[in-house]
Each structure stands twice: as structure tokens, then as C-alpha cells.
Image (tube, coloured by chain):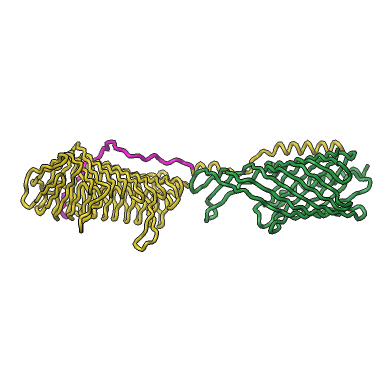
Amino acid sequence: MTRILNGLFTLALAAMLASCVSDDTDLADVIAQYQVEPVDIELDFSDLAEAGDVVVADENDPAYNDYVENSSWSKVIEIAYDEGGATVTGTVAGVAVETRGAHVTVTNLSGPVKFVVRGKTSDGSLKFYGDKRFQVYLDGADITNPQGAAINNQGSKSFYVVLADGSTNTLRDGANYAMVADEDQKAALFSEGQMIFSGKGTLNVYAVGRGGIRSDDYIRIRPGVKLYVNSSALDGLRANDGIMVDGGVVNIEATGAGAKGVRSGGVMTVNGGRMIAISAGDTRIGLDDEGVVDTTACAALYCDSLITVKAGTLKFKATGDGGKGVNSKGNLLVQGGTLMAVATGTNVIKKAKGVKLDADLQISGGYFYAYSKRSDPLEVAGKTSVAAGYVTCEMLPKVVTIAY
Amino acid sequence: MARSKRKQLALLLLVLCATFIPTSSFADDAGLVLSAEASHKFSKRLSASFEVEFRSRNSFRTADRVSFGPSVSYKLLPWLKASAGYNLLIDNNREEITYQDDGISYNNWRPSYWAPRHRFNVSLTASHKVRRVEISLRERWQYTYRRSRYIDNFDFDEAEWEDHEVRGKGKNVLRSRLQLDWDIPRCKFDPFASVEFHTTRELEKTRFILGVNHTIKKKHGFELYYRYQLSGSGTDEPNMHMLGLGYTYKF
């Protein structure tokens, strides 16, 4: 009997000592999939080797007028800023240039006119009236307007912003805009009409009052251009009717609550270049017209329409609460190039998603990467289609990678 | 001699049954209850004891609880006993996993963790002997308290570990146990059987026990039993098949 009892107790003791196995579900691999770190997206100011820009020569092509080369620029006026004043050189019939200190107002009733702008002012501006296309040739200009936009075009025709080769130009607005009745000024560099950037220089835009660069029409960016926009208030780069990126190096930082790095109200097409936008603001909480609480999340890229990526490199990162890497109401087509969207923000008010689409996602080429640290990397309300021929097609809880 | 062997065989069968029953039910779990108790009788009415207990789960592979504590009992009447006790319970709390609305994607994972609880109880036991069977009814009120604490929780939405607060809580349970003890003449083993209901606002668990006692020289007591614990609908704990082994030293 004693032997049986001893045996039982020995067995029990052994069982007790052997009870050291955890009964937890092994989720280490699953958690590892959730805790993956994103691809590092930072601004990149390095030079980009780009193929030469092909100027559209066909007058019937809708893009014909977007090329500054297709107009004659024999009419030239030079504006040289020198802190408290501006010296205007050259006259053109039909063009009136008025200076008040370093605040210059141009009324252009002539044909295409080239305005060469140089010099620095910490209390100046450049404003254009007239529905004629014109060119602003920035050649070492540094304009700060404490009361509003540094450059403001009230005309609705093509506004060519040409950056002189090797030049560095800077535009800054002020925290408080002095508004003029019946006129908009929505950004440090604002245009009612389409804005076309070209040249092989650099333009830095710092916005503290409103947006960085904004057109109430469309914006085209051509190869060779180097743009840097830092906006602490509203959107970094915004166009109501669309954005075309043919090339260039574009770096954008937007830190305002609810602000977008890049915002396109129309079709956005990317044919080349390198665009990097980082949105760091949190969700903006306000009241709508009816007094109801309204929340607006940030996005590094926000588009109301179709986005087509044919070539080039696009990198978008949102770090604020609810911030999206890419947020579009239209379809997203990735046919080539690289599109990377990262969201690292929290989900307190809105969900921080890598790519959020209210329509379809179609990927047929290039490289697509979406990441969200705390939410879905990819949310597509419509259909997602990935054409055959891909090398990688990986859809993990926090990362989606598709490569051709 | 032959009868003694039969009893030993019956004992072994009981152990084997308890061991193999776990495989009979998909959702059930199995574990071990080991206990050791030192008891002292101060007078015919008053006695005190100190008990240490260990439990396992997950088919005997995972430690579930370690507890220890003193208790005193006093015979109010020849057929009525009152007792009171305290136990420090150190629980290995089971993991908790919650899922998203789709029922597949993970939402939160709180791994298992060790944490103490304090338990106090008072009991009244009435007993009555009918021939060689003693029938006893024990009513026990127990209060268990745990302190608030922060534990690791993995939030799959946030993709990060975060501190999750397990709030402090006190819980009252009424335990009602009906037990039958047989005193078989010239037998070294005294079988017993009991059923016990744990009631809060609803029936939380029911325990069925079948076992034998064995005493050596009135000082060393052993008990071996099988316990089936049926969990109520309000709890997510599995039903448990438990094999219990206890030792009591009386001095």
C-alpha cells in the first residue's frame, strides 16, 4: 500500500514539475507580421537623372500651351528686389507695373511677357492682373510677404514659373493675410490660372498663413525643376483641376491639422520625376456650415479624381492621427514607376491608412507599396485588380507589396 | 487479501478513468490538484489547519494555480461545525483573444499572466450519519478580491503592446456542497462523493467529486479523487476533468 501511495505522490510531484508549458496561443509569427517597420520615407533633395523633356509641338495637343518654349518671349521686364524696394527695368506696351515699396503689382494687357525676377525682400510681393499668359523667370528671387502671398496671379491664363538654371529661389508668406475684396490669395504662391513649372533651378516655398503652392486651375511640373514646399498651415501643393508631374524633384512637408501634402481636385498623372510628400498634422476638428462637428484627416496625397502613375517615383507618408498616405475618391492606376504610401499615425479620431480609395485600384506595372502602422495598409471601396506578370504580390496585415 | 487486491485494482481503475476521460470531450480540459495540509486539534471542538495546493490545466502541462492559507473550525454542536479561512491564491490567468467583426482577424491578445488574489471564507457544515454513511451539507460564503494591475496586451489594430488595466474586483460566491462519506468496515479506503454548486448571481460552476480516503495510524491521511467541473454559461472557462491527490498530517 505504502508503495502505491509513494508511487502516486512521486507521479504527482513529477506532474507538478512538468507543468511548465505555456498554454498561450503561439502568436509570435502573427505579431511579427503586425510589427513590421515601414520603408523609410524621407525628403530627398539629391539630383535626379532625368530624360530630356519632350516639348509638345502639335498645336492641337491640349498640352501645347503648357510649354513655355511654344511662346515668343521677346517682351521682357526685369524686377529686382532690394529689401525695401524694387527696381523695374524695361517697358512693354500694355503692361503697367506699379511699385509700392517692394510690393509690385503688374497689369498685363499685352501678349506673352517674361518677367525676370531677382533680389531679396522681407516685406514685398509680386502680383499680376490680366488674362494674358506670362512667364515669371525666377533667377535668385527671395520674396517674403508678411501680409499675404509672395506671388499672386489673379489672371486665368497660363502662368509659367521658370526657374533659372542653377538658381535658388525662395517665397514666404505671412501668418495673417490682408485680404482684398473679390480676390483670392490661397497660398504663398497662388494662381487663379494654370501654373506650369519648368527650368533647372530650385524653388523653396515656406507657408505659415495658408497653403504653399496653389492653383485654382491645374499645375504641371516639368523635368529639371526642384521644388520644396514647407507648409505649417494648409496644403503644401494644391490644384483644383489636376496635377501633372512630368519630372522634377518635388519635396513637400505639410504639418497643419487636416492639411494635405499634395491635393488634386482633378486628374493627377505622373509621368516621371520624384515626388515625396510628408504630412505630419493630426485630424482637424471644426464645424461645418451647419454648425455640426466636422473632422478632416491629413493625407500626404489627396485626390478627388483619377490618379495614374506611369513612371517616376512617388513617396507619401502621413504621421499624424488618422493621416493617410494616399486618399483618393477616384481610381488609382499604377502602370509603372513607384508608388509608396506609408501611414504611421494613431487612430484616435480617424483611421491612419496607407492607401484609402473610394473607387478601384488597378495595378499593372511598376512597384506598389502600402503600409499602415496601426490600421489597414490598403482600403479599397471598389475593386482591386492586379494584372498578371508580377514578381511579388504580398498582402500582409500591415504591408501590401506588389512589384513587376 | 483477495479483497484488498480488488480494492487496489479499483483504485487504479479510478485513476486511469480520470486520466483518460479528458480525451472524451473536445472542449474540456484536464488537470491535477495536489494538496498538503497540516492540521492540529486544540480541543474536541477547536481545530486549525494550514493547506498548500497546486493545480494544473492544459492536460496537466500548465501550472494553473498555487494557493495556501490557514483555517480554523469549531464544533458548535455535535452535528454542526463552523469554520473560517483565508487563502492567498496565485493564479496563472488564461490568455484572452478577441477577434474583429469578421471573426477571423485578431483584435486583441492578452497572454496568460500570474497574479495574486485574496480569498476569505466562512462555512457552516451540518452532518448526519445514517448507518455507515455520513451525509454532510456545507454552505460556504467566500469573498475573493484582486487588486487592479496593468498587464501586457497586444492590440492588433495599433500593432503594439500596450498596458491593459485589469481592474480590481471583489467577488462573492455561495458554495453549497452535499457530500456522502462511507465508512466501510475493515476497509482501508473510505469512499466519498460530493456535488457542489458555486453560485453568484447565476450558477457559475458545478463540481462532481468521486474519491477515496485512506488514513494511516490516524496521523497521515490521503485522499485521491476525480473531480468533474462543469462551467456555467456565463463563464468562458472550459469544463475540467481534475485528478486530485491530497495529504493531511494531523498532530
Residue in the foreground of this view, choosing between A257 and B108? A257
Rendered location of residue B196, percent (x, y): 77, 54
User: Where is residue A50, by image quadrant?
Assistant: top left
Residue in the foreground of this view, choosing between B71 and B52? B71
Up the image or down, A129 lies above or below A28; here it is: below
> For residue B242: magenta?
no
Rendered location of residue A189, percent (x, y): 23, 48
Judged left or right of residue A7, residue A187 is left
Judged left or right of residue B71, residue A96 is left
User: Where is residue A171, by image quadrant?
Assistant: top left
Q: Which residue is found at the position 60% from the left and 48% from the top?
A: B167
Q: Which residue is found at the position 14% from the left and 45% from the top?
A: A101
Q: Colour of chain B?
A: green
Rendered location of residue A355, percent (x, y): 39, 50
Up the image or down, A288 lies above or below A352; here it is: below
Residue A156 visible here: yes
Q: Which residue is found at the position 51% from the left and 47% from the top?
A: B156
User: Where is residue B52, by image quadrant?
Assistant: top right
Which residue is at the far bottom?
A: A290
Which is the main secondary structure of the residues drawn in magenta? loop
Q: Quadrant of the N terminus of chain A?
A: top right
Residue in the foreground of this view, choosing between A264 and B177? B177
> For residue A36: magenta?
yes
Which stretch appears magenta?
A35-60
Q: Quadrant of the C terminus of chain A?
A: top left
| Chain letter for the yellow colouring in the rendering | A
Rendered location of residue A294, percent (x, y): 38, 58
